[in-house]
Amino acid sequence: MQTYGNPDVTYGWWAGNSGVTNRSGKFIAAHAAHTGLIAFAAGGATLWELARFDPSVPMGHQSSIFLAHLASIGIGFDEAGVWTGAGVASIAIVHLVASMVYGGGGLLHSLLFPGDMQDSNVAQARKFKLEWNNPDNQTFILGHHLMLFGLACAWFVEWARIHGIYDPAIGAVRQVNYNLDLSMIWQRQFDFLSIDSLEDVMGGHAFLAFVEITGGAFHAVAGSTSWEDKRLGEWSKFKGSELLSAEAILSFSLAGIGWMAIVAAFWCATNTTVYPEAFYGEPLELKFVVSPFWVDTVDLSGSGAAFWGHTTRAALSNVHYYLGFFFIQGHLWHALRALGFDFSKVRGAIGNDSEARVSA
């Protein structure tokens, strides 16, 4: 966290990041506990949606976000291909059990395990200490994150190939083989909102899996040796040795998640292949007053099951967009602080200006 040259700076209880800034053990505890909260929310909300689901009303016209996501990847259908919610309760319970495991892990790392991994008795654990201005340390940790993301993409590709996912073009679950066409993947960077092929969607995920696992392995290995420093020399500054800090990396994370949320909002609002109309509702219409927002193209004002008269698609798109917008604002705030900008001076300048006006 930015101290502006004051080594004794303290933060209030609401500044949660300050408590884990330089303590990797506490940082892991926060991650594990946060994952537990997410798993609990997913499991609990899935059971809540399932309990109040009305099969006579289209899923997209009910507040069924979690059911819609499960149905999209082919979960909840019977042998005849009709969505019945089969197996959904089991998945929800697994998430609830997992939330307790993650919560227990968070408590262990918070109360019993070392607050800083550098103090651990396990040599492998000490590699995950936090040295914010050490590019090799940050690269090593980044590599492991990338490999996990790659494995998640690979899992999704294999799930679609073996189990199958819902194809709105035929209104049924089918097995989807990925189309690893690099020219198609390059072109889809510019027209991904209109993608209408599940094979292309899986091809993009397969490509991401390869890039993330390969890049992650390289970063994990190269970041823990002197390989880069020996060959880059003064170019090691290119790795960010003059730019890295806890505040800067927080700003990078906020920028990434903010941009992903905004992209997801536009994609969800218009695409009916990845977000089937049967589960999310009809495509939306983009409006603009002070800022962009999406409105339904059907009237659900009389439906008590909907999100205050809106489709699941409308709720997802608008919430994602505005969360992404505020994440970007957080990115700008922390990025400026990482660059050394002192916001307290702005408050002081405004205060001095006010005093000057009163005196005048």
Image (cartoon, grey):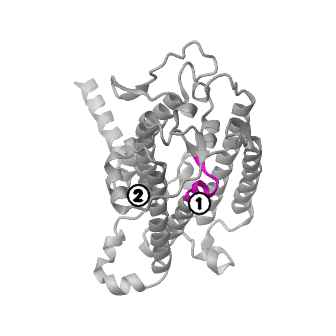
Please provide percent x and percent y for residue 255.
41, 50
Report the side of 272 relative to 14 (left or right): left
Q: Residue at x 67, y 40 (%)?
A: 81
Q: Residue at x 67, y 44 (%)?
A: 75
Report the side of 74 relative to 319 (left or right): right
Question: What residue does disc 1 label?
Answer: 158
Please provide percent x and percent y for residue 17.
54, 52
Circles 2 and 1: CB atoms closer than 8 Å: no
In this rendering, the answer to whether 253 lies above or below 137 is above
Residue 2, picture quadrant: bottom left
Question: What residue does disc 2 label?
Answer: 248
Report the side of 332 relative to 297 (left or right): left
Q: Which residues are magenta?
A: 156-165
Q: Residue at x 47, y 72 (%)?
A: 214
Q: Could you tell me which secondary element the residue under label 1 belongs to?
A: helix
Between marks 2 and 1 in the image, the one whose residue lies nearer the viewer: 1
Bin the neighbour count of mark 2 within 10 Å (Cα to Cα): few under 14, some 14-19, many 20 and up.
many
Q: Seen from this angle, which residue lies furthest top? A: 302
Residue 42, picture quadrant: top right
Q: Earlier in the sequence, mark 2 or mark 1?
A: 1
Q: Give the position of the C terminus as an image quadrant.
A: top left
Q: Main secondary structure of the magenta part?
A: helix
The kind of residue tagged 2 is Ala
Q: Nearer the viewer, residue 8 or 69?
A: 69
